[in-house]
Amino acid sequence: MPLAARRLGAQFYRMFANVDRCGRFARLRIGLCISLVVGAGRLAAQTISGRVYDSLSNRPLVGATVQLVPSTRGAVAPIQATTDSRGDYRLSEVPAGVYILGFYHALLDSIEIEPPPVRITVGGAGRSAALHVDLGVPSAASIIAAVCGSGADKNAAFGVVVGHVYDAASRQPVAGGSVVAEWQRIAVVATGLDVSIPHLTATTSAAGGFAFCGVPRADDVVLTAIRGGDTTARVTLHVSAAGFAHRQLYVDKADAVTVIAGDSLSEPQPTPRIVRRGHGRLAGSVLDAGTHRPVAGAQVAIVGTGISEVTNDRGAFSISGAPGGTQAVLVRAMGYLPEHRAVELLGDSLAALDVAMTTVRAMLDTMRITAAYSRDVSGFDHRRKSGFGRFLDSTDVERRRPFQTTRLLEDVPGIRLAGFGANMRILMGMSTRCEPAIFVDGAGFPDFNGSDLNAMVDPEEIAGVEVYMSAALAPVQYKSMSPSRTGMGCGSILIWTKRRR
């Protein structure tokens, strides 16, 4: 049972005999010692207040349960309070005595840290009637050192990812399952740039826990949980610059179903393929981020399952029969940037998802404002001389006169268009095909497909095009990794427009 679901009293009594040399309780399940800001050790206090701080996100911890437990069982009833929007708590009318003060929160469960309590003595005539005690979650450096060993926190290049895997139906921990972590690594070698996709595999503990040491800091890591034949979607997790990230994952049993056609976000396939089905249900709405009006006709798809629905006139949608657990949702609508979300489909419960979509026009206005800071003035000609990619300029565009930007790309060897309408995809490669990363005026759009690019850029606006057939050939600043793509080592397409000048 998660720590947040049980009271702290019994745990505090067990820990009372383990006071450290400072006279404070600071024991964590992973063996950390936390420094707590505490007032005088013996005060005549009837009110105890303070703030609970989350050192991992550098902000107050909202919704934490702070509990004050007497050292002698049954002396007085435990007193507790919940931190407010500023992370503050207040315990009033505390009788004289010796207590243990601590807190719990879902965040502590997710990183397997026990609440760090502190011993407090209340009493003494003539003393102050208030006591201030601040509590805090340990820092990322402390957790990294505890999980990965001494000295690991001093390596500025690597961080840690921790989390748990649960069964989506029962919410019980999944022991003996597997979790795979992948990321993109770019290294400078004698022959140029070496692009690789490192991966690590962890086996979940009896409590469903897992940890990855050595992941990159300030970068994205893609996680997938596996239990036998059941798997989650590929979920992107950002590791902070401090080097710490955590994620809960849910797996569920799914049925294998044979379908003839691919889903609406995939290239139609003439041969049958096997997809996963289950009892997952998802409902919600799609709105315009600027006007808050419903977006009708938006396509909401569970990635990789062949399941998708279209929003009605109220912008509402409802999906059933989806595989349960942690799944990826991709939302598309004409004139809007695609939106990628991760959802938890737990048992037969109806999951809710509301998505606010940004129009292409709003993005274009932002790019015009910031173009002076991001545009590549001379890089196009310099890279053109290198010979690593395929290059088109405004003269080529004028000669070919395509009615859509994707038609211009179709003339490039190794590029093929699949699908039509809102589901048109750009595929790259000869034998093995993948979806390239797309950049417009230096800004990356990892989930763009062909229709999105056509909506954003008209052919007559194009000043130059760069096409790199593999990640190894693409400039280092123009590579991307997206969980919705079929190949993270795929190449890149760069579009430069006249409006950036």
Image (cartoon, helix red, strand yellow):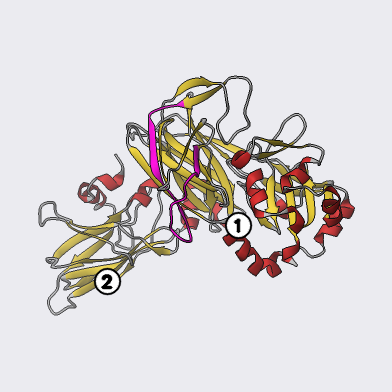
Q: Which residue is mark 1?
A: 156
Q: Amino acid at mark 2?
A: His
Which numbered marker is on residue 132? 2
Q: Amino acid at mark 1?
A: Ala
Which numbered marker is on residue 491? none
Q: Position of residue 385 (x, y in %)?
A: 89, 54
- Secondary structure under the numbered disc 2 in the rendered image: strand
- Secondary structure under the numbered disc 1 in the rendered image: loop
Q: Residues within 10 Å of mark 2 (few under 14, many from 20)?
A: some
Q: Of residues 177 and 279, which is closer to you in this image?
A: 279
Q: Of residues 90 and 371, which is closer to you in this image?
A: 371
Magenta residue span: 277-301
Q: Quadrant of residue 157?
A: bottom right
Q: Is residue 415 above or below residue 99?
A: above
Q: Is residue 60 above or below residue 152?
A: below
Res. 111 in view: no
Quarter of the image where the N terminus is located: top left
Q: Is residue 304 left or right of residue 464?
A: left
